[in-house]
Amino acid sequence: MMGDSLLEVSNLHVEFATEEGVAQVLNGVDLSIERGETLALVGETGCGKSVTAKAILGLLSEPPARIPAGEIRYKGQDLLELSPAQRHQKRGREMSMIMQDPMTSLNPVLTVGDQMMDVLKWQGKTRLGATEWLRDKLSSDAHYRDQAIEMLAEVQISAPDRVFSSYPVELSGGMRQRVLIAIAMLLEPEFLVADEPGTALDVTTEDKILELLEDLSAEHDTSVLYITHDLGIAKKVSDHVSVMYAGEIVESAPTEVLFSRPQHPYTRGLLDSIPRLSSAIGSGIPGELPDYTDPPAACRFADRCAHAEPTCTEVFPYPRYVEGEHAVGCHLYHGDPVHARHVDSADSAAYIGPAPWASESGGNPAGETPADGPSTGGDQ
Amino acid sequence: MAAEMHPESGDLVSLVPAADRAVTIRNLRKYFPVREGVLQRKVADIRAVDDVSFAIPEGETFGLVGESGCGKTTAGKSILRIQEPTAGEVIVDGTNVTDLSRSELRAFRRKMQMVFQDPTSSLNPRKRVRSIITDPMEIHDIGTEESRRERVAELLEIVGLPQEYMYTYPNALSGGQKQRVGIARAVSLNPDFLVLDEPTSALDVSVQARIVDLFEDLQETFDLTYLFISHDLSLIRNVADWIGVMYLGKIVEIGRAESVFREPQHPYTQALLSAIATLDPEDEAIKPERVRAEGEVPDPRNKPTGCDFRTRCPKEFGTCSSEDPPYYRVGEEHFATCYLHE
C-alpha cells in the first residue's frame, strides 16, 4: 500500500448508461504499480481492462460513462479530483499510452514527423493564444526535429530521417508500432499504458517490439501498465500480474508466483485453454461473460465455475491473501482480506475449500488439466 | 542423412500415398497483376501463392502456418476457387476442381466448404440464424422446408447451441456463438473437406479451446478432412497431423507435424518457433535455440534472388543468392527448402 507506489487505484467503479440499463462494468478494481515496475492486467474480451486504462488516463467519455466511486492516486494525488484541464496537463507529459492498433492510431494525412512535432510543441496546451501561434510560425523547428529523429533512432528505426518524413501508409505494421512507441516516449513519461501493443503484429515482429518496450522502460525507469489478453506475453513482460474477470480483479500476484501457483479457477481455466507445444489444449471455459446490466450478486464467475457452491452466489468473494503478496478472490481459500473495506463483511463461513489442486503444493499445474482435476473438494 | 534432392514442389504430394489422399494440391499458383500508368499496363506480378503443393489424407488435418501476407489465406481461397488460381491442380475426392465449369463447380461446392476468420462479418446481420444455416440447402435444393428445419435443429445441437437461437439475429450472439453458427453452416451440406481460415483468431483463448474441441468432434464424427490455416504455431501443433510453413507464397518446410515441431530445419520455422511466448519450462525446452529473423518481410513485388528468406536469415551464405533452393529431405516425412541441407 504505502511503499513506492507511483499509481494506486482503489475500489474503482465505472458504469455506463446503455439502452438496456446501467452497465456496472468495473466493480471495485484495485491496482498498484510501483516505480519502474511493469504490471500486466490480463483478461479476455469485454472484461473491462481497457476501461480501466481509460479511466486512469481520464479518457472515458462521461456520459455515457460515470465513475460513482473509487480513487486513482498518482504520486499520492487523486486524479479524479482534478479538473479536465489539469488532467490534460498530465497526459503525454507524465503519463502516456501506446494504442493497440498501429494501423488506425496514426493520422494518415500527416507525416510521422508532423505528428511527433505536434506532441513536442503543443502537449499540455489546451488553448492556443495568438502570440503563441505567431511565435511558433516565426521560430525554427530544428531542435524539435532533432529530438524527434533521435527518438526514432532510439526505437531502433534504421533510417530515422526517412521515416520522419514518411506518411504512415508507407510504413509496415511493425514500423508503425515503433513510431507509436516513439511518440509515447517522446516526453519521457513516468507512467505508460501499453494496450496490447503487439496483438496486431506477427510473432517475430511482436517479439522484437516487446523487447524494445522492455529496454526503453528499463532505461527511462518508466512504470508500465501492460494490458493484454495473452498470458504468455504477460509472463514475458511483467513483474506483477492482475487477472481480471467481468470487471473485477480475481487474482493478483508477482508474475513468477502467479504462473507457478495459479489459484483462481478462472486463471486456471484460462491457462489450461492456451495452446502449448508440449501438451494438448484444454477444454476451455464453458459459458459466457455475465450481463453487466444485471451482474451476479456475489461471485461474477460462479455460473461458469466447476467448483462453485451455493455460497458463491450469496457471499462476495473479496480478495484475500493466500501467500505473501498473492491475492485471490475466491471462497476456495482462507486468508485475510486484502482491502480494509472488506474486513467487516469477511465471512469465514463462506469457505468451501480446500481447492482440489491444493495438495499439489507448489507443483506446476500448467501442464495438467485443472478444470477437470480430481473432484476431492469443491465439485458438486 | 544423405540429402536426396527433390527438384520439384509437385513431388511433395508423395508424402501421402496416392491411395490415402483426400485432397491433393499440385503446383498451385495465384498471381495478382500490378498495373501502373495511364494505360494500366501490367508491370509485374505479385506471386501471392507461388508453386504450392501438398496432399492431405482422408480424415486428417493439414496445418498451413505463416505470418500475415505470406499467402496462406489466398492459398485457401484458390483451392476452393473462391479466387481463381492462376495455375495448378486441386483434386478433392478424385475430382479435379480446377477443371470444373462454373455450374459443375457450384454443385461440387457441397463437398468443400470454408469457415472464415471473422465470425461477425461472415454472417449476414439481417438474417436469422435459421436462414443463415438453411441458405446453403436452399441453394443446392436439398430437402423440403420441414426437413430443413429439422436439419437446423440437428445442426445447432451438433455445434452446441441451444435451439432457441434459431430465431435470433447474429448480433445477439457472442463471438464464439457466431463462429458456431458459421461452422453449422459449413457442415450443413455434409462436406468432405473444410478449409478453416484462422477460425479462432478473433476469439478469446477460453472460447478458442472449446471451438477447437468442436472441430475435433466433427472431424471424428463425419470423417472430415481439414486444411487449417493459422498464424499460431502452438495452436497448429495441437490440431494438425501435417504442417506446411509458408513464407512469401512458398512452402518452405513441410512434413509430419511431430517431425516439424521436434526438429524444425528451415531457419524461418526456427525463427517462428523460437519467438513463441511460452508459459512453462516444458514448452521452453521444446523451442529451438533462439533464431532471429532480421528486418522485415521484403516487398513481394521485389523478391530477393535465390532463397526468399535469405535477406532476413541469420545463416545466409554464398549459395543462398544463386537460385531458388530445392526441397531437401530432412526427415522421413519431412522436407525443407534450404541450402543448409544440401
Image (cartoon, grey):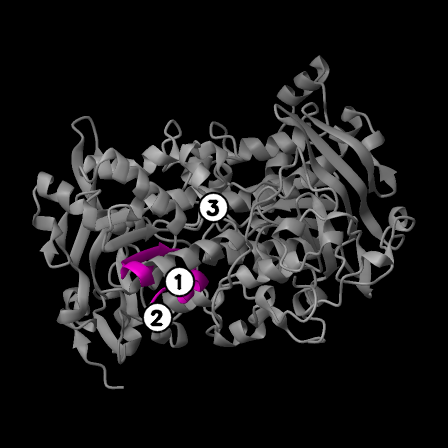
- What is the distance, in whole Å, between disc 2 and disc 3 at their CAs? 27 Å
Q: Which residues are magenta?
A: B219-240
Callout 1: helix, strand or loop? helix
Would you name the residue on which mark 2 appears? Answer: B257
Q: Residue furthest bottom?
A: B1
Would you name the residue on which mark 1 appears? Answer: B236
Q: Are marks 1 and 3 on the same chain?
A: yes
For the point 64% across and 40% down, the residue is A50
Q: Position of residue B160 (x, y in %)?
A: 44, 50
How many C-alpha atoms fall within 10 Å of the one at disc 3: few (<14), some, or many (≥20)?
Answer: many
Mark closest to the chain's N terminus, 1 or 2: 1
Q: Is residue A4 above or below residue A91?
A: below
Q: Position of residue B340 (x, y in %)?
A: 31, 76
Residue B229, magenta (yes or no): yes
Which residue is nearer to you in this view: B161 or A78?
A: B161
Q: Position of residue B61 (x, y in %)?
A: 31, 63
Q: Position of residue A178 (x, y in %)?
A: 54, 47
Would you name the residue on which mark 3 appears? Answer: B176
- What is the distance, in whole Å, between disc 1 and disc 2 at their CAs? 8 Å
The amino acid pointed to by label 1 is Ile
Q: Quadrant of residue B152?
A: top left
Q: Are marks 1 and 2 on the same chain?
A: yes
- What is the distance, in whole Å, between disc 1 and disc 3 at their CAs? 19 Å
The amino acid pointed to by label 2 is Ala
The answer to whether B329 appears left or right of A234 in the picture is left
Callout 3: helix, strand or loop? helix
Q: Is residue B106 above or below residue A211?
A: above
Callout 2: helix, strand or loop? helix
- Which numbered disc covers residue B272? none
Q: Is residue B251 above or below residue A112?
A: below
Q: Are marks 2 and 3 on the same chain?
A: yes
Disc 1 is attached to a residue of which chain? Answer: B
